[in-house]
């Protein structure tokens, strides 16, 4: 058995697993860690009157809804995701909302976007690039559908930095690595992008990183480990009798107020030259 990033292979998951991912994406979008990270660059994603913004890998549309809900949002927002189930959920979540007319959700593959060249003023990906099969083809497609002079934003974790404390450091390190391997196809891609952007005709205009850290309490990392720890076992990286006590130890640490987990996240804002 090999590791299969669930978001990469979402179309091969069972219905119950898809339902759990929909719930996780929606609850994550309400987490204050997540909203803080998105809010820090959301103002960069407003295309202006008559302009168009595309989110590639929009999932259930949580990020795009947060953008369009902003008082200062003007323009049109389009979300694309490979999962029919996620797109149906996204459409359901906006039905009846006052801003529904500004939004469109389509099923599509980020490696082969179904839009003519230069369609959008802004194209962004929020926690997509770490999951895709071929991140450089996705980057190329995002640039192709962006008009010259348009803005590209990529946000994601540097998941190779993700860690959960465990008294047994060696086992903890191996379980961190297994969790990352089971959950992300490209855990180090954010380290590569600044080096690659010029070769793709992109000029990096702004970039920053943030450490997401939960000490004592756990909310963001609790939901993460509860959702993805079972994939370590599914991938055959560790047996259930190692993963389950590790997960239980994380949940106990949260209960006791002794929890520690951390990961760094990066935001890149670039211009198509
Ligand atoms: C972690 S989710 C992020 C969803 C959304 N951006 C958010 O922040 O709530 C990653 C998303 O990327 C999508 N995805 C992965 N590979 C894709 C591909 N090749 N084409 C389109 N979507 C893809 C998955 O279906 C999933 O919805």
Image (tube, rainbow, N blue to C red):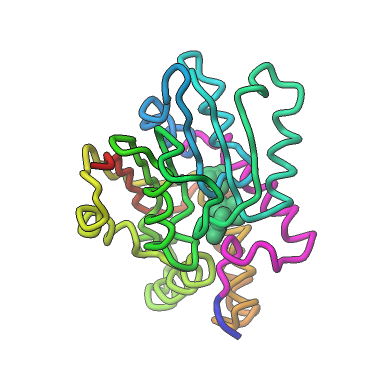
Q: Residue furthest front?
A: 116
- Asked where in the image residue 31 lies, by quadrant, the reply is top right
Which residue is at a point 57% across and 57% down the rendered structure image?
109
Quadrant for the C terminus, please. top left
- Asked where in the image residue 234 lies, by quadrant, the reply is bottom right
Image coordinates for residue 192, horizontal then vertical, percent: 27, 61
Which residue is at a point 62% across and 77% down the rendered structure image?
233
Question: Which of 106/133 is in front?
Answer: 106
Question: Which of 176/10 is in front?
Answer: 10
Quadrant for the N terminus, please. bottom right
Which residue is at a point 61% across and 64% down the rendered structure image?
6
Q: Residue furthest top?
A: 71
Q: For residue 256, say whether it is visible.
A: no
Q: Answer whether residue 27 is magenta in the image.
A: yes
Looking at the rendering, the stretch of residues picked out in magenta corresponds to 4-33
Image coordinates for residue 223, horizontal then vertical, percent: 59, 51
Q: Answer whether residue 57 is magenta in the image.
A: no
- Asked where in the image residue 174 lies, by quadrant, the reply is bottom left
Q: Is residue 102 left or right of residue 191?
A: right
Question: Which of 235/126 is in front?
Answer: 126
Residue 35 vertical placement versus 125 (above, below): above
Image coordinates for residue 121, horizontal then vertical, percent: 40, 32
Question: Which of 80/89 is in front?
Answer: 80
Q: Main secondary structure of the magenta part?
A: helix
């Amino acid at each position: 058995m090999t590791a299969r990033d669930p978001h990469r292979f979402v179309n091969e998951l069972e219905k119950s697993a898809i339902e759990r991912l929909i719930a996780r994406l929606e609850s994550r979008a309400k987490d204050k860690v997540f909203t803080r990270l998105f809010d820090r660059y959301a103002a960069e994603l407003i295309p202006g009157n008559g302009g168009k913004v595309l989110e590639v890998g929009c999932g259930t549309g949580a990020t795009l809804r947060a953008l369009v809900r902003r008082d200062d949002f003007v323009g049109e927002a389009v979300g694309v995701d490979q999962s029919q189930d996620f797109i149906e959920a996204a459409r359901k979540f906006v039905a009846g909302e006052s801003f529904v007319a500004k939004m469109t959700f389509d099923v599509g593959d980020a490696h082969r976007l179904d839009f003519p060249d230069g369609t959008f003023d802004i194209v962004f990906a929020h926690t997509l690039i770490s999951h895709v099969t071929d991140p450089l083809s996705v980057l190329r497609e995002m640039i192709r559908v962006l008009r010259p002079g348009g803005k590209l934003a990529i946000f994601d974790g540097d998941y190779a930095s993700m860690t959960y404390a465990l008294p047994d450091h060696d086992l903890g390190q191996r379980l961190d690595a297994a969790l990352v391997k089971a959950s992300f196809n490209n855990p180090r891609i954010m380290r590569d992008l600044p080096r690659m952007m010029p070769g793709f005709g992109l000029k990096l205009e702004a970039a920053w990183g943030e450490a997401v850290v939960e000490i004592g309490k756990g909310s963001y990392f609790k939901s993460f480990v509860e959702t993805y720890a079972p994939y370590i076992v599914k991938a055959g990286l560790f047996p259930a009798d190692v993963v389950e006590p590790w997960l239980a130890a994380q949940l106990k640490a949260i209960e006791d107020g002794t929890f520690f987990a951390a990961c760094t996240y990066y935001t890149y804002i670039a211009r198509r030259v």
